[in-house]
Amino acid sequence: MLRAAAGGPALLLSALLWSLAAAGNPELPTAVNITWSSINFKTILQWQPKPSGYLYTVEIHGQTSDTKKKCILTTETECDVTDLLRNVRETYTAHILSVMSSGMDNFEEPPFAVSEKFTPYSQTVLGKPEIQNYTQKGSKLNVVFQDPLTPYTFPNGSFQSIRDIFQNDLEYKIYYWKDQSSGKKDATTKSNTFEESVDSSKNYCFYIQGIIPSRKENRNGQESMVLCTSIGRNILDEYGAEVFIIIAVIAIAIITSAVVLSVILCKRKKAKAAREKEPLNGV
């Protein structure tokens, strides 16, 4: 009885404080449309709406890692969480907390929204490969390219590439075709070079993209810029036959006009000469 009596005021005070806190912090709006945007492991979390009278705090929850906070008490609706996802094979969820500007309440958990699950290794998009050099010599098209870099670094400070992370899971595909043609061929490699057999008399265009064949989704990466070889391109290759048809029509029109004008001038000259040879009237 003494213990119960002694604990009564403490319990009553706790309940009163909790009630006051709840009364002073009505239910806040929670985030909606939460999305993960990730290219080459640089990952941005985005959501809506813009806060009014409250702030957001982001919590990243991993399946095996401790909860970490980022973008604490922010008015923004996006947060770069790249540095919290270094274990790229871990699966994460984000909690977007809606909190008052004075900070999170000690007596109750603030309202929050939960994102979809995100696993960087299987969901980040592969960025565009950088083409360093390409040549067409005889019947060989040679292309050398560089792996996209990630935001993560080695102990010496140099940036890791996507190959450093994906290793043998990473492949590249080249699509190439004769210039001015729509028929495409393709080939794959696990290296950073392509050497393809082509028609030595034709120019070729091509682009490259990274591929993760083991993925069920997001298998294909972003496409590199399209480049074309140049082995003595002539005007017909550059502009097509249509331009020559137009030029020929214009040339024929000019020649025809010149001939007609010459005939007219010749007839006028003959007529003038004939008039000059006629005797004057009355002589």
Image (tube, rainbow, N blue to C red):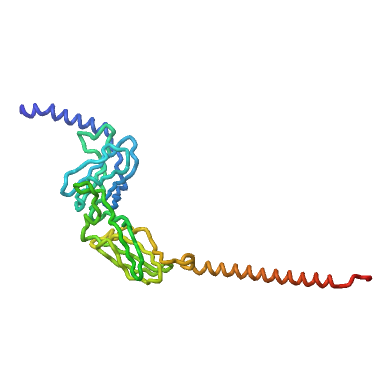
Question: Exactly how many numbered labels are in the figure?
Answer: 0
Q: Residue furthest right?
A: 282
> Is 48 placed above or below 120 here?
above
Name the spot of residue 260 as percent of width and height, x first. Answer: 69, 71
Spot occupied by residue 38 in the image (x, y as percentages of width and height) = 29, 51
Q: Nearer the viewer, residue 190 or 231?
A: 231
In front: 225, or 218? 225
- 3 lies left or right of 75: left
- Picture quarter with the N terminus: top left
Instruction: Return the x and y of residue 158 as percentages of the image width and height.
Output: 23, 48
Front one among 25 and 92? 92
- Residue 173 point in image, percent of width and height: 30, 64
Left or right, 7 with reference to 142: left
Does 269 appear above or below 130?
below
Q: Horizontally, is 190 left or right of 139 in the view?
A: left
| Residue at position x 20%, y 42% in the image | 68
Give me the residue at 22% from left, 31% from top.
Answer: 19
Q: Indicate the quadrant where residue 188 lies.
A: bottom left
Q: Quadrant of the C terminus?
A: bottom right
